[in-house]
Amino acid sequence: MITTHIETLRYRRADDPVSTLATPSAPGLKDQHSRNINYLRISLTDVCNLRCVYCMPESMTFKPEPEMLQLDEFEALIKIFAKLGFNKFRYTGGEPTLFKALPTLIKNVQDAAPDALQALTTNGITLAHLATPLRDAGVQRVNISIDTLHPGRYRDITRWGRLQDALNGLEAAERAGLQVKINAVIVRGWNDQEDVIELAKLSQHKPWQIRFIELMPFGGGIHSFQQDRIVSEQELRDRISAALGPLELQNNGTLDGEARVFALHGAKGSLGFISSVTAPFCASCNRARLTADGKLRLCLLRPDEIDLRTPLRQGQSVTDMNSHIRKAIFRKPWGHGLDQDEFATDRAMSEIGG
Ligand code: SAM
Ligand code: SF4
């Protein structure tokens, strides 16, 4: 039985006093709320080979190529961020493995910033042949999105994906020695029952973190679908513990990135809960996002963006770009307003990268 309630967990909440957050020696840039921002999530493309129901409509239209950053532009920007103290880069999308020059980009970033961590969030569909080249280039961690282990439901959720392709990708990632996490967005009425239990069971025998992600409302014409189908962390934890036994809180409740981590007794892996809607982690946010069309987005769920593509294409000096980015990061808003029913409608999730 779970006795720990969200309110009593020892993690930073959005209403924590700001003074507890300042970490003077931490890498990265400080924002106006004294948070250290050192993690850049980079959406390499808005294009995807799937159309997950909660992420984009089937008839999704993608941005024209000239608006998208090219390999050398991504490289130039990432190097600037690395010099500013950013030390974690995660490639996402759309589907980042569809960005043709991905291994080259990763290799070049690795050469320029050898101490930085490079990670990938992918649907895994193309990983069967890419896992080893990506590891060789410098990727250390991969989060693979698999919402169910049931082939029919996987197809329904992704609209046309083949579960076996994603599982082959997962196996290839494991063989390549990449640190693996599984992302599962839980959608009421689609995968919130036995799928959750089957996914949780994976953690018993594999050293993976299975991450249950609360559905977030976004733009892109599917807002009401998303709003109606959110399943809370508490509901999921209750369901898992009723089926598989008590969940043991890990790391004294300290967040692993954005996830609160639990484990089943004796399990090799763990269970992470990312509950942006019902238990936001804004107080400990350390991230900014670079969109595929070259905008620095300061909060996933707010429309504040700063254009980096135009000054880059106009040939602004590195010094000017540095100061542009510093000022932008300083203005990072405190947190999202989902609990006041404010949500970002300007972009679909696939255009930001999660
Ligand atoms: N295509 C890659 C993938 O699916 O892993 C990377 C991009 S995807 C936008 C990044 C993550 O966002 C995935 O784990 C996906 O499941 C999650 N995601 C997409 N739409 C979401 C939504 N409305 N709410 C919560 N998570 C979402
Ligand atoms: Fe594509 Fe990822 Fe969005 Fe699914 S969640 S449609 S795989 S970008």
Image: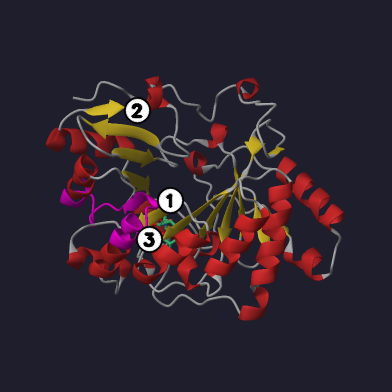
In the image: residue 143, left or right of residue 246: right
The residue tagged 1 is 216
Some atom of ligand 1 lies within 8 Å of the CB belonging to the residue at label 3: yes
Vertical relation: 242 (above or below) 338 = above
Considering the numbered disc 3 on the image, is that residue within a helix, a strand or a loop? loop
Q: Nearer the viewer, residue 238 or 72?
A: 72
- Which amino acid, mark 2? Gln
Residue 32's tag is: none
Residue 250's tag is: 2
- In magenta, the rendered stretch is 170-196
Vertical relation: 205 (above or below) 160 = above
- Neighbor class of circle 2 (other Cα within 10 Å; few <14, some 14-19, many 20+) is some
Some atom of ligand 1 lies within 8 Å of the CB belonging to the residue at label 1: yes
The residue tagged 3 is 54
- Neighbor class of circle 3 (other Cα within 10 Å; few <14, some 14-19, many 20+) is many
Q: Assign the N terminus to one quadrant of the image.
A: top left
